[in-house]
Amino acid sequence: MEKILEVRSLCKTYIVNKRQNNVLKNVDFSIDKGEMLAVMGPSGSGKSTLLYTASGMDRATSGEIIFNGKDISGMSAGELAEMRLDNMGFIFQQMYMLKKLTVLDNIILPAIQSKKNTKSKKEKAAYGQELMRKLGIIETAGNDINEVSGGQLQRACICRSMINSPDIIFADEPTGALNRNASDDVMELLSKLNKEGTAIMLVTHDARVAARCERIMFIMDGKIKGEYMLGKMSSDANMRDRERALNNWLMEMGW
Amino acid sequence: MFFYILKRDLKCKKTSNIIILIFVTLAAMFIASSVNNIICVLRGVDGFFEKAGLDCDYIVVSAVDEDNSVKNVIDGTEGVTAYKEELQLLCENSDFSGNGEKIFDLGKASFFLSVDNVKLNYFDVHNNKITSVNQGEMYVHVNLLEKNGLKAGDTLTVDMNGNRFDFKIAGAMKDALLGSSMLPYYRFIINDDDYMRLCSAAENVGERNFGIYYIYSYDPVALEEKISDEKGVQFDVPIDTVRSCYVMNKVVAALLLIVSVGPIFISFSVLWFAISSTISEEIREIGAMKAIGISDKVIRKLYIIKYLAITVSGAAIGAAASIPFGKLLLNIISKEMALDNDNTILITLICTLTLIGITMLFCYFCTRNIDSLSAVDALRSGQNGERFRRKSILSLEKTRLGTAGFLAANDCLSAPKQFGLITFIITLGLLPVMILANTVNTLCSDKLIHLFCATRSDVYIADSERSMDVIKGNDEGGLRNAREIERILADNGMPCKCHVEVYYKYSIKANNKQFVMEFMQCKETKASDYVYTEGVPPENKNEIAIASRGAELLGVDIGDTVMIEVDGEDKPFVVTAFFSSLKRYQFGKIGRFNEDMPTSIENSHGTMAFQVDFDDHPDKKEIAERIDRIKEIFKNDNVFDAEGYSKDCTRVADVTSALKRLIFVFSVIATMLITVLMELLFVSKEKGETALMKALGFSSGTIIANHVLRFVMVSVLAAIISSALCLPMTGLVMDPLFSLMGSTTHIDYKLVPWEIFGLYPAAIIIITAVSAFITSLSTISIKASQTSDIE
């Protein structure tokens, strides 16, 4: 299988109050095209740092990050920004959006900014609306972000992450701020996206969320402790089995 | 715990706390200096006169003859309660040279005054009373020094009947009586021994002995009537006339007053903005405190104490800085007047305490939301608790702007209060500069020539010797001198026509009111060549036009008959027109005769400049070259074109121009500071959003462009508003000031398009853009991974 992201000997060190904090220690992993990978681990294990560093949102202290065959670790800030804009999508736990824009404008903003996306503004807006319709939030298009619920907002964030048809979506605790129903809806959407060919790397604490993924990577103290292959999810019927199997493995990992 | 939270807050929110501290410092500096200046300016002339001890009712400057006739008249006039006599020695203009160069411009007359015989208080440039002068030194009036390019330490030589006396200039002097640039008299204060030596050297000392009489009288009118018959009197005026000679200083002072109000508004607006936006940033934190059970009262107290600490520190620094800052402004307008404030420290203290009080009130009002917000509201609503308030105005789909432009425009429109305030502040900085620019350009143009009762000519030659010759020779003198100037200029290849306006003093009566009025007449122009505000020009010998102010004083209207004493006989004259006059010391008591009205040498009083109109109608450049040649030919620097003559007549163009430059520099600095501080506040407030944009793939360039464009948009808007308002505002502000000088009509102000629509707006826009750009560079260090900092 062709790899979309390959991380080799990734290290990330923070220096806080003259103290060195090695958050990631020689991490190696890769994601195949169309794969859905969950990163799990206790708080402070380096999950989010791994996601941010691997996606080029943060600089690695050392190591190689190969995205679509290109080493992005040496790229300039501008090149990284362009790559994130055109080829990556992001979903955050807190549904971050620009407060002064409507939901639709927030969604289409990356498309308008993208040079690679050659559609007209109208077409971009229409595509944004189409995504909203698919995700069932079309009625909130003209609303301000303060006027919609958390679940709707997270769906809007998913729409935004998809607007430039990215190769991969990075999701940092995408369901962390949602209730169970909303969380299931969001995960269903992400699974659907993944089935359509978009690779997904998500960070989560929730085994229910991770159980929808093809592969689970367990991280602890900045090192990958192990990986678990659940395989592609065929239907919701076997969710319970996947979840149980995952929980068993997590217990083995010391969760 | 309470103080621990406070300490942590001060430490953790360093940027926003420092910004508040800077704003409070600036506010204290502006407010204390502006209030001090306003008090100084409002006391202005009265304060100066009080300080100088010029508290009499009437002034007489007269030669002292053996019979003491002036003193006898004063003694014998009813209403005089007391008087002081200040003796001085008249000096001839030809007596002087400075640093070896001849001094030409000594006004109408100059006097030596012994420091031991002063009856007023005279001040040096630092407003210290001059109590002693070293032998061989002299204090010289500041205007005389400036006019002749002299300074303290230079040598001024007096040639008294072949005896040379070298004086070292000890410094510039401020003289309440003769210190106004409107009065063509100067005084030199010297040591008493030097004074006696000069008296001994003077051949005709009897003719040179002059006295200035400071008279206390409850009936100055009676004194005026009696004294006007005395031959040796150089000039005699009620004290109000002397006071009104400072009208130009008042105009400049009023301008300072106006521009001092601006910074006060700016300071309070900026402070309100800074406090409200930093408190709104902390709403979520307030929610967290409420949630864990800290009472509203304690939370409010926490913020109020925090801002009190910052305000007290900032106000103390600002108060200290306000004193030199205020003096800088005041020095510009107090060149001739000893303007200062004995209560500077007290006023600064009051201003500082007021500022602290008002800032605390701001805090009180800004924190009142704390009471009404529930913990959940505050936690949920994030930034400002306005959960259901619509913010988005523009649509990204429909915009023609780029992303950065769209976001900038959307930001401005979504927060109209915030950006409106910045626009208001920039406008407030720009508008006074434009008003002053229009004023200076008008003062330096020929638009005011008609207000000085003159026709427009190519060249104006102010020549005091020829002027005296005209007075002595009356019409013949005027014509003779005009012909002579024509001949000299024709000999030098500049054929021309020359004429001169002559002033005549006549007593005018109407409605039981009587005073001496100055009438102007030129035998070689027609009364219809001048500008009148109402009525028709005087076409017959028995018709006159008078200044509107004079008409008001007499209580007459067009068509009324007034009596004018001509050759000892009251003759009727019909008022046919009113005109507006800025002529300086007449203060409305000015009129115009028809050119055919026979005037008398006895009544001639002075002339205006000789006006030259070249036969070949040269262009401006050629006129400028000819002016240089005329200066050489007549050895006279007082040769002007129409613009220069107008500027010379008002004498405030330079000081207004200096004030304009200073205010412009302040505006630029203030705009720069406000932009930097506001942008710092925005960067800190929008850190999370910036990180999010970066995470989404926006480059630092786009984010910086967004930040810069917001400020460019508001500065462009401010520039448009200022440009649109500057002419009406100039009229609104300056018309009352010109009316102080005697104008009764709206002035047609000169707007220089490249300056008003180009230079100043461009400078402010560039300064704003550069300041915002440099400050927004700090967003580069915000990482995409800091998205979680978003609140």
Image (spheres, helix red, strand yellow):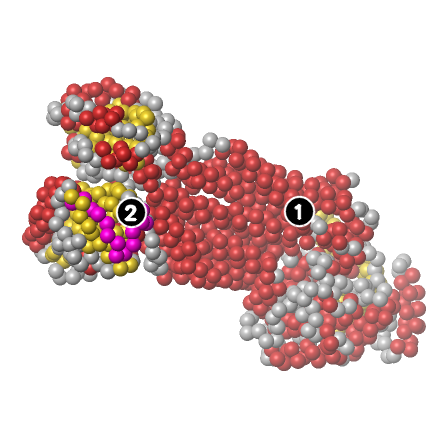
- Please give the residue where the numbered disc 1 appears in the rendered image: B363
Q: Residue at x 13, y 61 (%)?
A: B616
**Is B54 rendered above or below residue B746?**
above
Residue closest to the eye, B434 or B731:
B731
Taking the image as shown, residue B597 lies to the left or right of residue B380, namely left
Q: Which mark is residue B59?
A: none
Residue A144: say if magenta: no
Residue B557: say if magenta: yes
Q: Position of residue B65 (x, y in %)?
A: 17, 25
Taking the image as shown, residue A11 lies to the left or right of residue B436, namely right
Task: Report the amino acid beneath label 1.
Answer: Cys
Asked which quadrant contains residue B156, the reply is top left
Q: Position of residue B185 (x, y in %)?
A: 24, 35
Helix or strand or loop: what does disc 1 sit on?
helix
Task: Tell me how far mark 2 sits from mark 1, CA to CA.
Answer: 63 Å
Q: Chain of mark 1?
A: B
Query: In this view of the protein, can residue A5 be seen by the observer?
Result: no
Residue closest to the eye, B30 or B256:
B256
Q: Chain of mark 2?
A: B
Task: Report the amino acid beneath label 2.
Answer: Asn
Q: Which mark is residue B511?
A: 2
Which quadrant of the figure contains the C terminus of chain B?
A: bottom right
